[in-house]
Image (cartoon, rainbow, N blue to C red):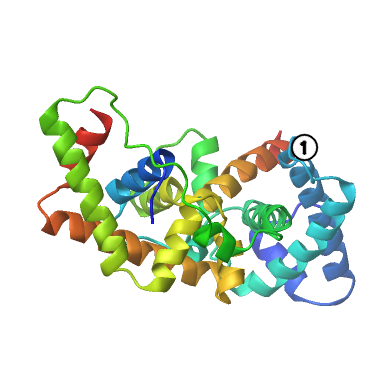
Amino acid sequence: MSLSKEEIDTLIRLIGLTRDDEIDCERCLTLVAEFAEQVLAGRSIPAGLEAVAHHLSVCEECCEEYEALLEALKAIDG
Amino acid sequence: MVRDNQTWLAHLGGTGPDQQAALSDLREVLLRGLRRALSHRAGGGEEFLEDVIQDSLVRILERLPQFEGRSRFLTWSMSVATRVAMSELRRRRWKDVSLETLVDGPDPATERAVNHHPGPDMQWERQAILDTMHAVIRNDLTPKQRTALLAELRGMPQDEIARQLGSSRNALYKLTHDARKGLKRGLEEAGFTAEDIRAVFTG
């Protein structure tokens, strides 16, 4: 099995970010609304939500959903 | 009607006119939010939106007991709806791609990584890291972990990998998390720290 340059770069980045304890996609979904409200309000991220920021850095799908959520919230709050 | 979190929960969790009114109001808010969030995405037209809103309302009602009140109810509901919408868009985009073909197909052209003019020491270290990574993938990961990791690196979304493996997205995340931990551990045991790796591949 060979990996392309892009695949190697992605894997190296992911390995560098890997922690023993990470929250999964379900837990991220439970917390991401609070996380998004903090971000949109310009508040700093409390320690309890740091795991969400980390999960978003390693999970492409949750990150994509989070970005869509920010857009959606601008529409309903704007 | 303006509702606080408790009122949303009471109305949606109840029956009768209050529930119907709450569902109707929630539907309108979700539609407004998703219309904007999906406006620049292919496949996110009105018919798609209608389907997704219906699925989202069902999902939100199912998940009501999991709402912890840590945000506004509408923000939480929108997070559920965006997951439903994005998952469905990804499913439609990838539904005809077979996991087997993606993983067992011809290997992509392997181009050894980054820095095009590394010194001999760095070139040696880079090759050693790649050899270790390949060895861990080959020898230490389970076949399922290998398949999931490779499919993810080749761009297939976790929802679709999970569907084709007969698993769930959450279980899939755990599978690839364990694979990443195995790779990290294997590299550390071979003497390569995260800092070494970053220095060699981005230096």
Q: Residue at x 49, y 42 (%)?
A: A38
User: Does residue B194 appear anywhere in the picture?
Assistant: no
User: Does residue B8 appear anywhere in the picture?
Assistant: yes
User: Does A66 sit above or below residue B26?
Assistant: above
State which quarter of the image contains the C terminus of chain B. Answer: top left
- Nearest the viewer among B28 and B35 is B35
Residue B119 place in picture, x, y as percent: 15, 25
Give the letter of the chain under mark 1.
B
Q: Residue at x 67, y 36 (%)?
A: A74
- Nearest the viewer among B48 and B11 is B48
* Left or right side of A65 for B110: left
Which element type, helix, strand or loop, lies under badge 1? Answer: loop
Residue A49 place in picture, x, y as percent: 40, 51
Q: Quadrant of residue B38?
A: top right
Residue located farthest toward the top when viewing the structure as drawn? B117
Amino acid of disc 1: Ser
Total marks placed: 1
Q: Quadrant of residue B90?
A: bottom right
* Left or right side of B22 for B123: left
Q: Quadrant of residue B175?
A: bottom left
Q: Residue at x 20, y 39 (%)?
A: B126
- Nearest the viewer among A73 and B12 is A73
Residue B108 place in picture, x, y as percent: 47, 46
- Nearest the viewer among B110 and B30 is B110
Label 1 crowding class (10 Å Cα cut-off): few <14, some 14-19, many 20+? few
Q: Residue at x 83, y 51 (%)?
A: B49
Residue B200 place in picture, x, y as percent: 20, 35
The residue where tag 1 is placed is B39
User: Does B82 sit above or below residue B169?
Assistant: above
